Amino acid sequence: MVEDSLSKIELQCCSLIKSFLAHETSGDTFCGTIATLWMSHRDIQESIKKTWDEPYDKQLVKARLRGELTAEEFAKLYSELLGLGKMTKFSKMINDAHSVCSVFSPSPEDQWEIDEEQLQSEIQILFTNYQQTCNL
Protein backbone atom coordinates (compact mmCIF):
# COMPACT_ATOMS: atom_id res chain seq x y z
CA MET A 1 0.00 0.00 0.00
CA VAL A 2 2.74 2.49 0.98
CA GLU A 3 4.85 1.54 -2.04
CA ASP A 4 1.81 1.92 -4.32
CA SER A 5 1.15 5.41 -2.95
CA LEU A 6 4.79 6.38 -3.36
CA SER A 7 4.90 4.98 -6.91
CA LYS A 8 1.79 7.00 -7.76
CA ILE A 9 3.44 10.17 -6.48
CA GLU A 10 6.58 9.36 -8.48
CA LEU A 11 4.55 8.91 -11.68
CA GLN A 12 2.63 12.14 -11.08
CA CYS A 13 5.86 14.01 -10.42
CA CYS A 14 7.61 12.69 -13.53
CA SER A 15 4.57 13.54 -15.64
CA LEU A 16 4.49 17.05 -14.18
CA ILE A 17 8.19 17.57 -14.85
CA LYS A 18 7.85 16.43 -18.46
CA SER A 19 4.91 18.80 -18.91
CA PHE A 20 6.87 21.68 -17.40
CA LEU A 21 9.96 21.01 -19.49
CA ALA A 22 7.76 20.88 -22.61
CA HIS A 23 6.45 24.38 -21.71
CA GLU A 24 2.93 22.98 -21.16
CA THR A 25 2.87 23.98 -17.47
CA SER A 26 3.80 27.35 -15.98
CA GLY A 27 6.42 27.77 -13.28
CA ASP A 28 3.76 28.81 -10.76
CA THR A 29 1.62 25.74 -11.46
CA PHE A 30 4.67 23.49 -11.48
CA CYS A 31 5.96 24.74 -8.12
CA GLY A 32 2.52 24.61 -6.52
CA THR A 33 1.99 21.03 -7.65
CA ILE A 34 5.52 19.98 -6.67
CA ALA A 35 4.86 21.36 -3.18
CA THR A 36 1.67 19.27 -2.92
CA LEU A 37 3.43 16.12 -4.15
CA TRP A 38 6.40 16.77 -1.85
CA MET A 39 4.09 17.08 1.16
CA SER A 40 2.29 13.85 0.25
CA HIS A 41 5.63 12.07 -0.12
CA ARG A 42 6.83 13.43 3.22
CA ASP A 43 3.60 12.43 4.95
CA ILE A 44 3.89 8.85 3.68
CA GLN A 45 7.46 8.63 4.95
CA GLU A 46 6.33 9.98 8.32
CA SER A 47 3.53 7.40 8.47
CA ILE A 48 6.13 4.65 8.07
CA LYS A 49 8.03 6.03 11.07
CA LYS A 50 4.90 5.96 13.24
CA THR A 51 4.84 2.16 13.03
CA TRP A 52 8.29 1.83 14.64
CA ASP A 53 8.84 0.85 18.28
CA GLU A 54 11.87 3.15 18.51
CA PRO A 55 13.16 6.22 16.59
CA TYR A 56 15.45 4.13 14.38
CA ASP A 57 16.02 7.00 11.95
CA LYS A 58 17.32 9.23 14.76
CA GLN A 59 19.59 6.43 15.93
CA LEU A 60 21.08 6.24 12.43
CA VAL A 61 21.59 10.00 12.33
CA LYS A 62 23.36 9.93 15.70
CA ALA A 63 25.58 7.04 14.55
CA ARG A 64 26.48 9.03 11.41
CA LEU A 65 27.30 12.13 13.46
CA ARG A 66 29.51 10.06 15.77
CA GLY A 67 31.41 8.86 12.69
CA GLU A 68 30.28 5.26 13.10
CA LEU A 69 28.80 5.21 9.58
CA THR A 70 30.06 6.53 6.26
CA ALA A 71 27.67 8.59 4.13
CA GLU A 72 27.17 5.58 1.87
CA GLU A 73 26.45 3.23 4.77
CA PHE A 74 24.03 5.74 6.26
CA ALA A 75 22.17 6.19 2.95
CA LYS A 76 21.88 2.43 2.43
CA LEU A 77 20.67 1.74 5.97
CA TYR A 78 18.22 4.65 5.92
CA SER A 79 16.79 3.46 2.61
CA GLU A 80 16.43 -0.06 3.95
CA LEU A 81 14.88 1.26 7.15
CA LEU A 82 12.16 3.08 5.26
CA GLY A 83 11.83 0.18 2.83
CA LEU A 84 12.04 2.52 -0.10
CA GLY A 85 14.85 1.13 -2.27
CA LYS A 86 14.77 3.13 -5.50
CA MET A 87 12.50 5.68 -3.86
CA THR A 88 15.44 7.32 -2.08
CA LYS A 89 16.62 8.55 -5.49
CA PHE A 90 13.15 9.92 -6.11
CA SER A 91 13.13 11.43 -2.61
CA LYS A 92 16.33 13.30 -3.40
CA MET A 93 14.95 14.57 -6.70
CA ILE A 94 11.61 15.76 -5.29
CA ASN A 95 13.33 17.36 -2.28
CA ASP A 96 15.74 19.18 -4.60
CA ALA A 97 12.91 20.24 -6.95
CA HIS A 98 10.95 21.55 -3.96
CA SER A 99 14.02 23.51 -2.84
CA VAL A 100 14.57 25.00 -6.31
CA CYS A 101 10.92 26.05 -6.38
CA SER A 102 11.43 27.91 -3.10
CA VAL A 103 13.60 30.46 -4.91
CA PHE A 104 11.43 30.72 -8.02
CA SER A 105 9.67 33.98 -8.78
CA PRO A 106 7.87 34.81 -12.05
CA SER A 107 9.40 38.29 -11.72
CA PRO A 108 12.61 38.01 -9.69
CA GLU A 109 13.47 41.09 -7.68
CA ASP A 110 16.27 39.75 -5.48
CA GLN A 111 19.48 38.27 -6.85
CA TRP A 112 18.82 34.93 -5.13
CA GLU A 113 15.50 34.48 -6.95
CA ILE A 114 15.31 32.61 -10.24
CA ASP A 115 12.98 33.11 -13.20
CA GLU A 116 11.09 30.46 -15.16
CA GLU A 117 13.94 29.87 -17.61
CA GLN A 118 16.40 29.25 -14.77
CA LEU A 119 13.81 27.05 -13.02
CA GLN A 120 13.46 24.94 -16.15
CA SER A 121 17.22 24.62 -16.43
CA GLU A 122 17.58 23.47 -12.82
CA ILE A 123 14.67 21.01 -13.10
CA GLN A 124 16.10 19.63 -16.33
CA ILE A 125 19.40 18.89 -14.55
CA LEU A 126 17.64 17.23 -11.60
CA PHE A 127 15.40 15.14 -13.84
CA THR A 128 18.23 14.06 -16.13
CA ASN A 129 20.33 12.98 -13.11
CA TYR A 130 17.34 11.12 -11.68
CA GLN A 131 16.72 9.30 -14.96
CA GLN A 132 20.38 8.33 -15.25
CA THR A 133 20.67 7.01 -11.69
CA CYS A 134 17.47 4.98 -12.11
CA ASN A 135 18.36 3.80 -15.62
CA LEU A 136 15.06 5.13 -17.01
Image (spheres, rainbow, N blue to C red):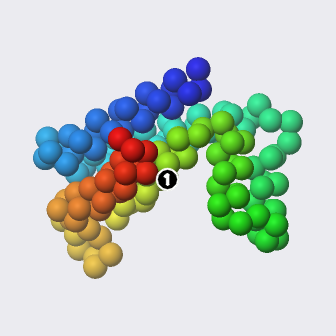
Dot 1 crowding, Cα within 10 Å, few <14, some 14–19, many 20+:
few
Identify the residue shown where x is 71% and y is 66%.
Answer: 70
- Secondary element type, mark 1: helix
Is residue 41 left or right of 123 when viewed as pictured?
A: right
Q: In this view, does 68 lie above or below 56?
A: below
- The residue type indicated by label 1 comes to Lys
Is residue 120 left or right of 72 when viewed as pictured?
A: left
Q: In this view, does 36 lie above or below 124?
A: above
State the quadrant of the N terminus: top right
Q: State the image coordinates of residue 93 (x, y, percent, origin top left).
A: 43, 51
Q: State the image coordinates of residue 20 (x, y, percent, origin top left).
A: 21, 45
Q: Between 132 and 13, which is closer to the camera in this rendering? A: 132
Q: Is residue 85 above or below residue 126?
A: above
Identify the residue shown where x is 78% and y is 55%.
Answer: 60
> So how many labels did they put on this image?
1
Q: Name the residue under label 1.
A: 92
Q: In this view, does 50 lie above or below 105?
A: above
Is residue 34 left or right of 115 when viewed as pictured?
A: right
Identify the residue shown where x is 49% and y is 53%.
Answer: 92
Identify the residue shown where x is 28% and y is 39%.
Answer: 16
Q: State the image coordinates of residue 90 (x, y, percent, origin top left).
A: 47, 45
The image quadrant that residue 12 belongs to is top left
Which residue lies most toward the right here?
53
Q: State the image coordinates of residue 31 (x, y, percent, origin top left).
A: 32, 49
Residue 81 visible in rendering: yes
Residue 106 visible in rendering: no
